[in-house]
Image (cartoon, helix red, strand yellow):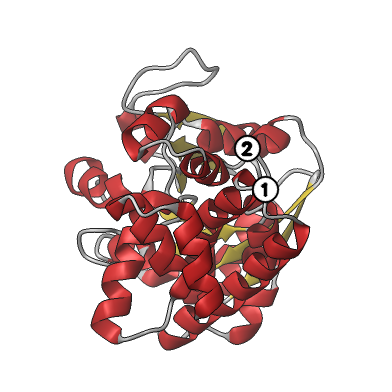
Amino acid sequence: MKLAIIGAGKWGQALYHAYSQNNDVVIHSRTAREIENFVSLEEALSREYLVMAIPAQFAREWMEKNFEDRGQKILVAAKGIETSTGAFLNDIYGEFVPNERLAFISGPSFAAEVQKSLPTALMISSTNAQLAQTYADHLPDFIKGYISDDVVGAEVSGAYKNVIAIAGGVCDGLGLGNNARAALISRGLVEMTRFGVAFGAKTETFLSLGGAGDLFLTASSTLSRNYRVGLGLAKGKNMDEILQELGEVAEGVPTAKALYKIAKEKEIYLPIAQEVYSMIEEGKDPLQSVKDLLLH
């Protein structure tokens, strides 16, 4: 498989490591990196198969400025909802490439563990089952690949779990205990399912690797950037301070803003996402958010 990874953040480099085991892989990002097989954008776009590891909030701008359609197949590796428009990533990439050439990766997968070749299972979702299977079949031996045709379900669960992970970090940062975290994560699963079904997703997707699997992982570990945002909020830090300390993109922050906007427009009940938004955007006291969640 001749494949190019575009985006050399931690997840992009992890996928480069994974796909390089059995394939001819190059990598590119906007800033040059000292990585083996780092190539120019032109060379990357000449590959038949692409993996787009560009943060969700920059995907549209990157595609508008840089992408040239040469019939490439694309595996989207980012997770999130565009804050300015409320668009899902399949909507954004669908403006540049037909759906049958698009696939989306999800599932419980910390980049640091993939880099160490630790056992992992991932979901590849696409309306084109053959394309999903191709990307799954070329994963290395330490990654088990499953396929799905529920693109919307994969998109929603991949984006939403980051918001619940912020709440998970707040929960643990406040020392609320195991009972509270279990309640939060299970109710978070119900909430993101409600949201996804409103957009045509399948309920069973949220009980899969891409749904419950990724949620359980991300909402309970300091390896999660979004969880660490929640820990910072619990300590009373402001968002500028938290994000500066983090030094990385935490997709749950802009996604919480997008969910808040969509929930108001479509009248979808999203209490956890609402409280995360209030803490991030309005500086609401985390303990007050907990009290309000217990009342509703």
Of 94 and 225, which appears nearest the observer? 225
Q: Can residue 132 be seen in this snapshot?
A: yes
Q: Position of residue 137 (x, y in %)?
A: 70, 55
Q: Quadrant of the N terminus?
A: top right
Q: Position of residue 206 (x, y in %)?
A: 62, 75
| Location of residue 62 (image quadrant) | top left
Residue at the (18%, 48%) spot, across then down: 64
Marks 1,2: beta carbons within 8 A: no
Q: Secondary structure at mark 1?
A: loop
Mark linked to residue 12: none
Mark linked to residue 175: 1
Q: Is residue 182 left or right of residue 271?
A: right
Q: Position of residue 68 (x, y in %)?
A: 24, 46
Task: Using a 10 Å C-alpha cutoff, classify the residue at mark 1 as few (fewer than 14 neighbours), some (14 to 19) or many (20 or more).
Answer: few
Residue at the (29%, 74%) spot, across then down: 262
Q: Is residue 4 left or right of residue 123?
A: left
View extreme (top): residue: 34
Of 238 and 106, which appears nearest the observer? 238
Q: Can residue 81 be seen in this snapshot?
A: no
Q: Secondary structure at mark 2?
A: helix
In terms of sequence position, does the residue under pointer 1 or pointer 2 come before the other? 2
**In the rendered view, would you say 129 is above or below 3?**
below
**In the rendered view, would you say 158 is above or below 35?**
below
Of 23 and 258, which appears nearest the observer? 258
Task: Using a 10 Å C-alpha cutoff, classify the residue at mark 2 as few (fewer than 14 neighbours), some (14 to 19) or many (20 or more).
Answer: some
Q: Which residue is mark 2?
A: 111
**In the rendered view, would you say 246 is above or below 102?**
above
Q: Amino acid at mark 1?
A: Gly
Q: Position of residue 74 (x, y in %)?
A: 44, 54
**In the rendered view, would you say 228 is above or below 147?**
above
Q: CA distance from mark 1 to mark 2?
A: 27 Å
